[in-house]
Amino acid sequence: MKFLLCFFSLGFLIGCQNNGTESTVAQDPNAVYVQLSPAEFKAKLAEYDNPQLIDVRTPREFEKGSIAGAKMINIKDPSYAREIEKLDKNQPVFMYCQAGGRSGKACRQAVDDGFTKIYELKGGYGDWEE
């Protein structure tokens, strides 16, 4: 009995271990949601000619500065879900906010909505350097 308890406990701990920032979640086992440092985010963006780069901040925040090529879709706006639905779910989507809270919520929602590759800027625009 002790052996079984130890065995299942060890299996649980190994299963919960996070060896990086990549995770597969939600209904699609191939869906990937990854938090990337500013340098990693910039490098990943450079891999695509026309990336779906989404700034989920408010218009006021967006006006103060944004990443080149970003489209603002304010997560606090009632039209947010409708605007996100217009994106191609089979293409990578890159999201950021000011510090990471709102974009984290947006990325988790994107996974639930069926997006297959979601990249979040860790630390948000506040940590971004052009």
Image (cartoon, grey):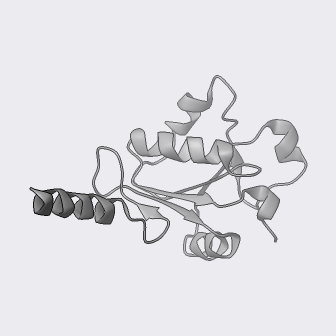
The answer to whether residue 13 is above or below residue 85 is below
Instruction: Tell me if 30 is positioned left or right of 18 in this view.
Output: left
The answer to whether residue 43 is above or below residue 35 is below
Quadrant of res 50: bottom right
The quadrant of the picture occupied by the N terminus is bottom left
Q: Nearer the viewer, residue 42 or 17?
A: 17
Quadrant of res 91: bottom left
The answer to whether residue 54 is above or below residue 42 is above
Q: Position of residue 126 (x, y in %)?
A: 81, 58
Residue at left 91%, top 49%?
A: 64
Residue at left 50%, top 66%?
A: 21
Q: Position of residue 70 (x, y in %)?
A: 70, 54
Instruction: Tell me if 93 is positioned left or right of 80 in this view.
Output: left
Residue at left 49%, top 44%?
A: 108
Identity of the residue furthest to the top in this view: 78
User: For the image shown, how many numbered marks are present on the structure?
Assistant: 0
